[in-house]
Amino acid sequence: MPKDYNLTPKPGKRISLADHDPNYHADHDEESARAELAILREELDEWQERLYAEGKQSLLCVFQAMDTGGKDGVIKKVFETCNPQGLRVASFKAPTSDELARNFLWRIQNQVPPKGHIGVFNRSHYEDVLVVRVNQLVPKKVWKARYEQINEFEQLLTETGTTILKFYLHISKDEQKQRMEDRLADPKKQWKFSMGDLPVRERWADYMAAYEDAIGKCNTEAARWYIVPANHKWYRDLVVMKAVVKALEQMNPQYPPPEAGLNQVKIPD
């Protein structure tokens, strides 16, 4: 594995997840990663306040992963100190009958963060080219058309003030097995285990192929994918936090100017 492991493949490049080591953690160890994470968390809090105060831009963070990949964990670790007034988290389960009666992006559009907010998607519109594809829930010609529809949707969001970060949390099949066994062994975590996870695991190769196409076909300049090595939770959290803080720095939200005449205001007794 090269030392300069590329987290963000270039747009237009075919993706092979076998080329990305889920155990990679650069030169970090857990202690140094957690120390850096604490510093970055303070920066994130400051940038979020500025984003909310400015009210002109929004940030959308999309998380996708296999079962036990760490979506819940990374969302908690990265955004735990953010002001909830300016944070919107949406979790996308199987669509309802009402949602199925509309186009696949309808329920997604309703959760796009408003100006001044950070939006977090736990699963997303990509389920409609992942689980839908693997389980053949719609004809092939339908899900194949969705790659371009997703690109156009994300392009529209970026053109109207939303910066998009997309994170695929990349774990190995062996790591997934260990995490599933840990859940089964811990009474406090057994509620997270679903018998339905096992048939999904049996189709690991099919899901890897679906993820490779989803990442490769929807990795654009407007909305880049991060392939995050996620076997080490502490490194996963650091990678995501760095990307979020860097995006906000580039967005550079500013506090709005104060009302005129504030220097003359006297607070009455």
Image: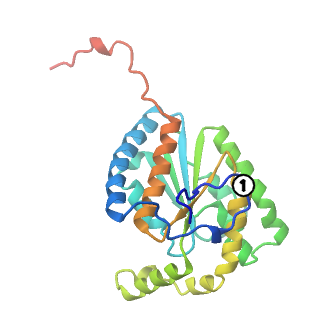
Q: Where is residue 64 in the image (x, y as percent from the top left)?
A: 58, 65
Quadrant in which residue 226 is drawn: bottom right
- Residue 98 visible to the viewer: no
Q: Position of residue 17 (x, y in %)?
A: 64, 69
Q: Is 9 above or below relative to 249?
A: below
In the image, taking residue 151 as reference, residue 235 lies left or right, namely left
Left or right: residue 212 compared with residue 244? right
Residue named by callout 1: 150
Task: Please identify the quarter of the rendering in which residue 29 is found.
Answer: bottom left
Q: What residue is shown at x 63% (from left), y 68% (from top)?
A: 19
Q: Residue at 72% of width from left, 55% of height from top?
A: 150
| Colour style of the rendered protein structure | rainbow
Type of residue at label 1? Ile
User: Does residue 79 sit above or below 179 in this rendering?
Assistant: above
Question: Residue 193: percent from the left, percent from the top?
Answer: 47, 82
Q: Nearer the viewer, residue 255 or 172?
A: 172
Q: What element carries label 1?
A: helix
Q: Position of residue 53 (x, y in %)?
A: 43, 34
Considering every residue shown, the one lying at the far left of the view is: 269
Quadrant where the N terminus lies?
bottom right
